[in-house]
Structure formats: C-alpha cells, structure tokens
C-alpha cells in the first residue's frame, strides 16, 4: 500500500498516518467492551493501563521488510520517494511543533512549549497570524538546538525550491496565478527569536490549516541542509537537485537516527540516545507509557516473500515484520501455534482503490467510469473471490473513524450500485421472459404475451453499464453489443467512442507477491471491461515500478498510464485532510508534483476544499467533507474497492510494546521504534 506523501506526525510513533480506532488482539478475551465492524475486525475500548518503561539495554531491534527502501534523503521521502517502506526507515527521525499521541490521537506538543496550538488572530490588514513558543530543551541529535530558524528554513525551502507532494500539504504558501488570482496560503513564516516562530496567512485558517498544516509538518535542520539547499537553488532543477542529495549524516530530531542502507539487502538506524523527549510520560487512549528509545539500533532486513520472513520470525532472526497490508491469513496458524510469537489483528485507516488517468480517453469520459463502477461486484469479489478477508468500500472515510464517518450517506452510495432494479434494457425495450407459448419466443401474437420482469444483480449491472456508455458517446458495431443470456454475460466487442475504435488499455497493479488481493482484483476488472467490449489487459507488476509509472512523468512531462490499483494509508483521524491532497486540482502530479495522480480537477470540489480549510469547527468540516465525498462518488476519479483488517506478528519472546491495540497496527507506527523494548 502506498502512503500519502505526508499527512501528519505522531509523537514517537512517527508515521504518515495516525489512527482513530483500536482493535482487539487475537485471543484477548479481557480487553474491554467489543463490537464488530463491517470489515470483520473486533474493536475494543481499552481499559486504562500503565506500562513500565523497558530497561535501557544493548538491544538490536531486528525487523523484516518486503520492498526495498529507496532513499536516505528525508526531503525526497516526503515527495517523490514517498513509499511506506521509506517511512518505516526515516519516519522516526524528524520533529514537528505538535504531534499526536498514540493510541488516543490527542494533539500534544513536540518541540512547541505548550500543547495548546492557539488560534490565529486578525492583524487588521487582511492577514492572520499565530505565534508559537518553542521548548528550550529540544535539540538535534548532534546537540544543536532545534530553533525557530529551522522552522523558517524548512518552510521557505518548500516555497523557494517549489517542492511538492507532502511538503505542500504541510507548508502551503499563497501563490499568484498568471491571471492575478491570489490563492489562500502562508504569506510569511518568521523567527521572532531563536525559540519563537510566527506564521501568517492571507485568510483566517481553519483547523485543517492550523494546527494541521505547518503545526504538524516536519522540521529540517538548517545547519546541515542549508548549504545543500543553497547549491540546489542554483541548479537548473532545484527540487530534483535537493531530492538527489545524500542524507547521510542528517541529524535527527526524533528517537532514531538514520545510519546506512544497502540497496537490495538492508537498512540500519541507531538510537538517538540524546533524544530530548526520552523519559517523558505519555497518557493516551487509556494507556500510560514512557518515551524511549530503549533500543541501541534497528536493522531492516529485506525478504523476498512473507513465507520466508515468517520462518525467520519463528527462528528468532527477526522480532517484527513490517507490511502495510498485513500478513497473509494463510500464515496465521504458523504464528498462533508458536508460543514465542504473538499475532495482532487491527482495523485499518485506509483504502485500496482503482484510479483513472483523466487526461486520456476513454478514462476521461464519465460514462466509462460509471460503466465500470456498475460492473465491479465488490460484494461478490470480497466474499467469494477474496474469501472474506476483505470488505467492500464506497466512501473514502473509514468506518472505523467514527467521529467522521457518516453511515447513512455511505449506505446511500452503496445502494446506488448494489440496489439496482431495472425495467428496461440498454436499448429501451422492457425486460421480459419468454411467453408461455409452445415456440418459447418472446411475445408472439398467436402464442400469448411475454412476462415482464425487473432485472437485478449482474443483469441489471450490465445493462446499466451499457446504458451509461451509450449516453456518453460510445457505440457498438451492429450485433456486437454485450448481453445477458442464461444467467451469464455474453461479451461485446469492437466498442467505439465518437466513431473511433477504442484502443488497447492497460491496468497496472501490485504483483501477487506483494498484494495478491489487488493483483487478483486487477484481472477481474480487466475481464469486466472486456465484457463491455473494450480491449484491456491487467499487468500486476513490482510495487516500486508501479509507483514510478504513476507519479513520475516521462521525458516529455507526461503520465502515460491508463488505470492503476494502489492504496492509501490515511492521515490524522482527529482531523483528516487527505481530500485536498489526493483530489484538489492544484495538487495534480503534473502541476506541483502532488498526490493527485488522476489529474482530477473539479471546480466544485476545489471550492469545497477551500471551505474545508476555513472550517473552525469539526461539525462544519464534517459536513463539507461529505459534500466532497458526494462529488467523488459521482465523478469517480477513483473507484474504491476494498480494505482489510491487518494481521501482524511479532516475537513476544524477544520484544515488548506498551500497547498493540491501535488503528492500522504497529507497523504504521513505524514499528514503534521509539517505544519498543526487550521482553522482560
């Protein structure tokens, strides 16, 4: 599963995501009151507990990964190299002003002096500012103080080098377009003194902007990166030059320090023994624990597949296995039967989806996307093909995020697809059974009349799909339209758009070794399109190759993919801001190297993004969010597919965690590098 290029920061459990719901570990019967979600995961309200801090020992935390890390440069990791595997390696190395404590997700101070972020005040000139005092004891791993100057340096680097992706999500500056239009954004970030920073906007920032913008954005060390940024600024491609620079020696402001990586083999971090927050006691979500790190270092070993990694776990060679998708359920028995291992199942804060390149036909055609949405039987695929390990999705907001989820609207979305009832075929004629006459033909005058009926299920899906295509310029050669006969689809062929035969199309997806669920789904989707008369092949491929094709333009500055399947791990559930990152027109990959790979650019949606950013209450923001969801459901830049609960395993004979019940699991907290300790 790929991740947002940056969506926020946890204290200690620093990741691209934070979670909103906890799930009970396997076999735990005394965790508290439980309920069952649509995804089959069991959720629990944890009883208050206090965990003792692990002892400081010379302990190497040994972890396994399944895809290679690709950079040691944090700047690059937040933008073009933003894979979850790089997050595991680098996520625990940078500070922010504020962070969210797991597992309860309360906003607290990191390098800020107070946990209260304050609110922006009116300067009387059309601008609004907020001033933040910073902690005196916060230092980089080399002993240099983390200062307001570092915050200013980070923000201005984003502006001056025109960085994209997650950097824009955190530090969004006001821009002036060619037509003179001025966008909402930062107008200044200033160091009042070494430990005081002021942010100024040209509009009143809502909660999505402050504190969930620069307040939780990463801070970079000016004394290390200043010369690199200056050299990059003088190059022909400043952002590319910065992203290509080595991150070796980059000081850490988190519990871990990057040490080294060997492509195709392993990576290594060491503990930040002088971490300014070490020893701090945190109470969150009913759990009280102490901040580490309690390890000496961490090794990330690359394994070819999950079976090999589980064997290493059982042999004592690995303590924890990272995987954003969780372990395959077929391996669960191997884990639960071993007394040295513990299996944990958590609900997830994310989704897996199919996306379209809206810059190309026929993907840019609304009828094409509508037709495919009708054809994909998510319920059947989830239960029968994927054997119940997945659950279908119709809205991007996870059901587990109860504060933001709207069950009624999500159910309405699902009903529009699953509750289809049609009285007429795509050609306008009524559905009718053969008449009761001897010849069995439809409605002959001498034998009687055919019996009309209402089509449902796959028959209704097919005819709704063809109707959508025909209403949007698609046609078929005579006699080559698809049909539904004897409870089966008779495929169409030779489909045309505006009189021209639609050319061959490709669907990219992760390979079966990485995610067999999406690899399988891509084949099913390709068959659905072939049934409609398109010429389509699915190409499950290497994850990093797929991300490169989707997010990195070719030498002509174009993205040539047709369709792809990927997944997102979402941002802070306390205040989700991912809609702007994924779908706002200004975040098109080809506009500012953003996360909007399809190139979706809907004026109504863009306007709602700005309203969301100005919302000062959660109630207002939630209403706007579901207005955005309505547009996404109708326009379909993505077709949401499914998600799963996440199964994880760790060697409880070797390591211990202060808690394991957390939305999306241990691994999306970067394996709790700053909290894990040796088992007692």
Image (cartoon, rainbow, N blue to C red):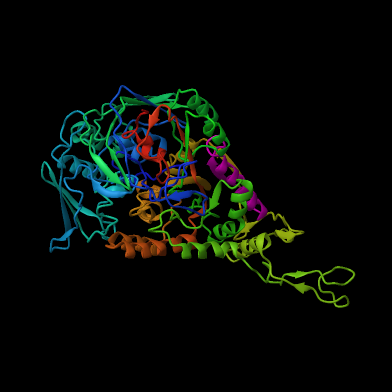
The answer to which of 133 and 494 lies nearer the viewer is 133
Q: Is residue 524 magenta?
A: yes
Q: With 362 as the anchor, is 483 left or right in this view?
A: right
Q: Position of residue 115 (x, y in %)?
A: 21, 49
Residue at (56, 34) in percent of width and height: 333
Q: Position of residue 561 (x, y in %)?
A: 51, 45
Horizontally, residue 231 falls left or right of residue 460, namely: left
Image coordinates for residue 436, horizontal then vertical, percent: 85, 72
Residue 330 is covered by the magenta coloring: no
* Quarter containing the C terminus: top left
Q: Among all residues in the image, which is located at the extreme right?
A: 438
Question: Residue drawn at (61%, 57%), measured in percent from left and top?
Answer: 375
In the displayed structure, 47 sits above or below 472; it is: above
In the image, the segment drawn in magenta is: 505-534
Residue 253 visible? The answer is: yes
Horizontal and vertical percent for residue 500?
61, 56
Residue nearer the viewer, 539 or 132:
132
Does residue 477 sit above or below 197 in this rendering? Answer: below
């Amino acid at each position: 599963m790929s991740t947002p290029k940056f969506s926020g920061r946890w204290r200690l459990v620093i990741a691209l995501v934070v979670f909103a719901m906890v799930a009970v570990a396997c076999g735990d019967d005394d965790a508290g009151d439980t309920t069952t979600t649509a995804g089959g995961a069991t959720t629990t309200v944890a009883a208050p507990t206090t965990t003792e801090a692990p002892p400081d020992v010379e302990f190497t935390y040994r972890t396994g990964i399944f895809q290679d890390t690709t950079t040691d440069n944090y700047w690059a990791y937040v933008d073009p190299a933003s894979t979850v595997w790089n997050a595991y390696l680098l996520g625990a190395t940078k500070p922010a002003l504020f962070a969210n404590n797991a597992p309860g997700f309360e906003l607290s101070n990191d390098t800020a002096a107070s946990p209260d972020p304050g609110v922006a005040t009116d300067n009387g000139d059309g601008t609004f500012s907020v001033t933040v005092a910073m902690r005196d004891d916060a230092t980089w791993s080399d002993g240099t103080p983390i200062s307001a100057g570092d915050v200013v340096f980070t923000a201005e680097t984003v502006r001056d080098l025109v960085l994209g992706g997650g950097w824009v999500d955190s530090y969004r500056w006001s821009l002036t377009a060619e037509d003179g239009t001025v966008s909402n954004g930062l107008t200044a970030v200033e160091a009042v003194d070494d430990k005081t920073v002021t942010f100024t906007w040209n509009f009143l920032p809502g909660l999505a902007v402050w504190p969930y913008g620069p307040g939780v954005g990463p801070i970079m060390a000016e004394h290390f990166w200043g010369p690199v940024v200056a050299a990059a600024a003088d190059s022909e491609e400043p952002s590319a030059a910065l992203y290509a620079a080595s991150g070796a020696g980059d000081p850490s402001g988190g519990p871990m320090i990057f040490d080294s990586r060997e492509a195709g083999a392993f990576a290594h971090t060491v503990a930040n023994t002088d971490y300014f927050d070490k020893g701090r006691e945190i109470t969150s979500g009913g759990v009280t624990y102490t901040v580490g790190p309690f390890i000496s270092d961490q090794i990330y070993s690359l394994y070819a597949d999950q079976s090999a990694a589980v064997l290493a776990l059982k042999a004592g060679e690995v303590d924890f296995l990272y995987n954003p998708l969780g372990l395959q359920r077929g391996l669960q028995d191997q884990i639960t039967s071993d007394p040295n291992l513990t299996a944990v199942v958590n609900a997830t804060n994310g989704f897996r989806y199919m996306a379209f390149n809206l810059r190309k036909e026929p993907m840019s055609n609304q009828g094409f996307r509508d037709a495919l949405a009708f054809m994909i039987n998510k319920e059947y695929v989830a239960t029968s093909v994927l054997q119940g390990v997945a659950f279908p999705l119709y809205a991007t907001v996870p059901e587990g995020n109860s504060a933001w989820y709207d069950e009624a609207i999500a159910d309405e979305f699902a009903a529009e697809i699953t509750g289809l009832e049609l009285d007429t075929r795509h050609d306008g004629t009524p559905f009718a059974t053969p008449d009761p006459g001897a010849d069995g033909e439809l409605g002959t005058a001498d034998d009687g009349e055919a019996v009309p009926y209402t089509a449902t299920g796959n028959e209704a899906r097919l005819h709704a799909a063809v109707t959508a295509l025909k209403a949007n310029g698609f046609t078929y050669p005579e006699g080559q339209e698809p049909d539904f006969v004897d409870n089966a689809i008779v495929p169409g062929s030779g489909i045309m758009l505006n009189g021209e035969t639609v050319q061959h199309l490709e669907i990219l997806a992760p390979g079966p070794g990485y995610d067999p669920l999406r690899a399988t789904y891509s084949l099913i989707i390709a068959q659905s399109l072939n049934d409609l008369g398109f010429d389509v092949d699915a190409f499950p491929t290497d994850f990093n190759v797929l991300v490169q094709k989707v997010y990195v333009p070719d030498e002509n500055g174009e993205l040539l993919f047709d369709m792809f399947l990927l997944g997102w791990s979402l941002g802070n559930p306390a205040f989700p801001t991912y809609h702007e990152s994924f779908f706002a027109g200004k975040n098109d990959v080809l506009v500012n190297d953003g996360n909007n790979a399809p190139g979706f650019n809907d004026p109504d949606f863009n306007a709602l993004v700005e309203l969301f950013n100005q919302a000062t209450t959660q109630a207002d923001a939630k209403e706007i969010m579901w207005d955005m969801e309505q547009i996404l459901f109708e326009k379909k830049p993505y077709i949401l597919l499914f998600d799963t609960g996440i199964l994880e395993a760790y060697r409880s004979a070797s390591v211990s965690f202060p808690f394991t019940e957390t939305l999306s699991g241990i691994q999306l907290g970067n394996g709790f590098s700053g909290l894990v300790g040796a088992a007692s």
